[in-house]
Image (cartoon, grey):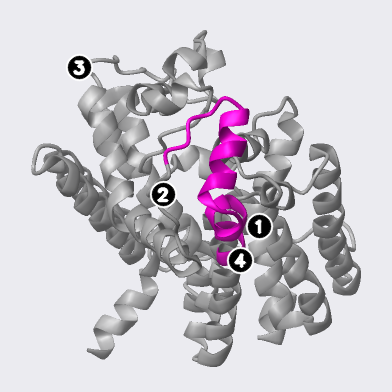
Amino acid sequence: MQNLILLYRKHALFVLYTLVLILVGIGLYYGFGYKHLPKIGIYSIFISLSYIGFAYLLKNKTVPSVKLPFNFSLNYKILDWVLFSSIVLFTAYHLWFLGHVPFISAVKILDYYKIAFIRQSIIEHDSSTIKYISAFMIKGIIPFALLYFSVTNKRLFYLIIPVSIFYAISLMQKGLVISIMIPLVVLTLINKEYLKSFLYTLMAIAGVFVLVYATNPNLRATQEEIRAEMEKNGHLYLQDQEISVGASFLSASDAIYTRVFVTTGLVSGYWFERIPSVYPYAKGCGYHFLAPALGCNFNDYDYSRIIYDATYVKESKIGLKGTVTVANFVYDYANFGYYGLFYSAILLSLFFILLNILFNYEFKWLVSLNALFIFWLSSGSFSTLLLSGGWIITLLLFLLFKNNLLKNS
């Protein structure tokens, strides 16, 4: 048993990703029976064999110390304030750029469709810089900062946590409120600090509750008031009964449960159903970073949006834009079929081994800082998570603050 525990701790990321594949498989089976399970089965075999191979080839490897050609001394007090200030200043600037605090604006509105358009407007604007920095902040910088300050600087931690939760709520996505707290929750569970873990989880749940209240007019007004407001705006009101606060929160909880255990695999099935029978393999044009080099128009192969429009016809007709994001290996399948599954497995398994080496197999930090991204592989491409989804940023921050983090832990 002791050997199994040690083996798990050494290869925790691969174990976590195996759980992700199981979740995707459950959703696939729920929606399509056994039809598409062979695809995930083949991919699972590919990644297992390649991971074992790389683990053997790179065993006992370590990251060598880098000696700079000049005297460079890190002043962590200054770096701490730079990290703290970057979060506060960008949060203020982003909300100024949007011109309002979205969830506060939503609270004042009784029209479901107008609330949906507010959520859409948060990302549907013409500033790529804001989009990328916001993604870096909410998916990489803020989760790292919360974990880091909780260990090294309690004063800044207590100051930054309300700002971070407020910003996550402002972006009006329940998953973001939860995700920024995950590294903290994981770290405290590993440290057996169960009261702290409970409190951080409670904060995330409170944030979800705020969003449930903001996005559900039935919690703030009667059916007649909502119907009158929507009909005035030319929108059809379909709600036929009052929903209590408790019922709405349970509905949100059920949505999160469904998102984790069903939707992650179900939407992958939507892609498998249409590729290549309806839409051809993209042959590299489905990668945003690669399409220009291949002379492709990425929009012609942006299957996440194309399949959304084909699946959610009603929403598309009224102007709502969305994406059907799927597990990382499905993007590779959409580009090169079964060959895509093969190279996807090789790249990701090698990356897991390199992460083990980078963190020197330190279980606590390896899992705390990477578990969130492992889960996000269930609904995002590896390249997107790495380049613009905050993963690289998190790893760079770990390297920069590593000495101070380890010294205080």
Mark 1 and mark 4 in contact (Cβ < 8 Å)?
A: yes
Residue 396 showing in the rendered view: no
Measured along the vertical axis of the image, is residue 391 above or below residue 246? above
Q: CA distance from mark 4 to mark 1?
A: 6 Å
Neighbor class of circle 4 (other Cα within 10 Å; few <14, some 14-19, many 20+) is many
Between the C-alphas of marks 2 and 1, the distance is 23 Å
Which element type, helix, strand or loop, lies under badge 2? loop
Q: Residue at x 56, y 14 (%)?
A: 292
From the top left corner, tell me how far across and down residue 209 is, in percent.
56, 66
Q: Nearer the viewer, mark 4 or mark 2?
A: 4
Q: Which mark is residue 213?
A: none
Please tell me the numbered disc located at residue 207: 4
Residue at 14%, 43% (x, y): give it: 37
Are discs 4 and 2 less than 8 Å apart at CB? no
Residue 304 sits in quarter: top left
Q: Which residue is mark 2?
A: 377
Please state the extent of the stretch shown in magenta in the rendering.
Answer: 209-238
Residue at numbered disc 1: 169
Cα separation, mark 4 vs mark 2, equals 24 Å
Confirm whether the magenta stretch covers residue 112: no
Q: Position of residue 355 (x, y in %)?
A: 49, 59
